[in-house]
Image: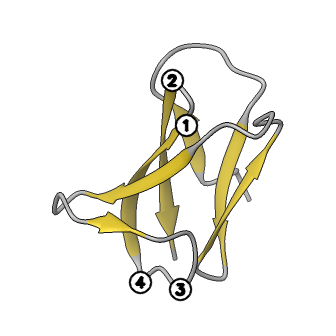
Amino acid sequence: PAPSNSALSGASSVSVTIENGNVVVKNSRNAAVSVTGLDGRTYGLTNLPRGIYLVRVGSQTFKAWSK
């Protein structure tokens, strides 16, 4: 299956996925990570309910979904 993420701010070597309700960030170089739902709520990096999220890694934002 296709990865469940897409960069909203152009090409990036950073990869963001949500696996089993947990945010997985690759190649972030220890950048700060925040997760916001489409409802505007801020979430942690684990135990995410099904839905679509905006994941900010440093200065880049990614769209990811939890199935």
Q: Tell which tag, 4 or 2, sits nearer the viewer.
A: 2
Q: Earlier in the sequence, mark 1 or mark 4?
A: 1
Asked if labels 2 and 4 touch by Cβ distance under 8 angstroms, the answer is no
Which residue: 76% across, 40% down? 30
Question: Which kind of residue does numbered mark 3 sit on?
Answer: Asn
Q: Are marks 2 and 1 in contact (CB under 8 Å)?
A: no
Check residue 47 in the rendering and tell me which mark sits there, or answer none.
3
Q: CA distance from mark 4 to mark 3?
A: 6 Å
Q: Which residue is mark 4?
A: 49
Cα distance between the residues tagged 3 and 2:
24 Å
- Label 2 amino acid? Ser
- Camera-near label (1 vs 4) is 4
The dot on residue 6 is 1
At which x and y percent is residue 63?
A: 45, 44
Q: CA distance from mark 4 to mark 2?
A: 25 Å
Between the C-alphas of marks 1 and 3, the distance is 21 Å
* Relative side of 53 to 44, left or right: left
The secondary element bearing badge 2 is classed as loop
Q: Which numbered disc covers residue 59? A: 2
Which residue type does callout 4 highlight?
A: Pro
